Amino acid sequence: MTAKSLTMNREGEFRVLATGPTHCGVDENLVIKYNMVCECDVKLDHRGFLFDQVNVDAFFKGIRRTELSCEKLCIDCAGKLMEMIQAENPKAVIRKMTLTLSPAPHLASMKFEWEKSKRKATKPFIKF
């Protein structure tokens, strides 16, 4: 059997100070749930990891404040996660990244999807 891809699915939550006029509600202790799904070629690091999923949670827990809307925050976080994965495992080939953020009261969510083009290289994210 030949493995073609591995998919990491990590979910959790983090607290952030949401400021500015670009939120549905400003909150000093906003709880945001996240779900990241990352599909990669099978290119493991020296430890046998695609990448360390604990670092994904640490990334989100490191976000202390934001003025970005949920839409922009979702796009920005996906791009930074892809950069983090590439730095951790330079051999990693990300095929697809899906990131969903759901701020409290968790009645709605925002989902960002990026998929590697088979035709040509594409930029995985948008900078704000």
Image (spheres, helix red, strand yellow):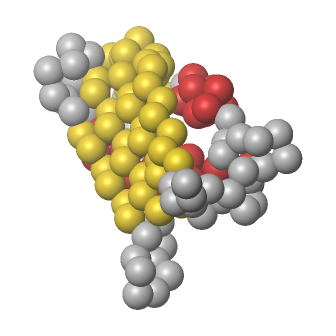
Residue 93 is at least partly visible in this image: yes
Work out which residue is located at the far right of the displayed protein and give it: 46
Q: Residue furthest bottom?
A: 119
Using the rendered image of the protein, determine whether residue 28 is visible from the camera's viewpoint: no
Q: Residue furthest front?
A: 1
- The mark tally for this picture is 0
The quadrant in which residue 12 appears is top left
| Residue nearest the viewer, comparing 105 with 50 | 50
* Left or right, 37 with reference to 106: right
Q: Is residue 7 left or right of residue 100?
A: right
Image height of 41 relative to 57, above or below: below
Using the image as rendered, state which of residue 109 and residue 18 is in the foreground. Answer: 109
Quadrant (top left/top right/bottom left/bottom right) for the N terminus: bottom right
Q: Position of residue 125 (x, y in %)?
A: 45, 63
Residue drawn at the location 27% of the way across and 44% of the way down:
111
Residue at 44 percent across and 25 percent down: it is: 11
Q: Quadrant of the C terminus?
A: bottom left
Residue sitting at x 72%, y 62%: 91
Across and down, in percent, residue 24 comes to 19, 29
Which one is nearer the viewer's eye here, 107 or 116?
A: 116
Q: Position of residue 58 (x, y in %)?
A: 63, 26
In this rendering, position of residue 127 left or right of residue 88: left
Give the residue displayed 47% in from the left and 52% down from the top. 39
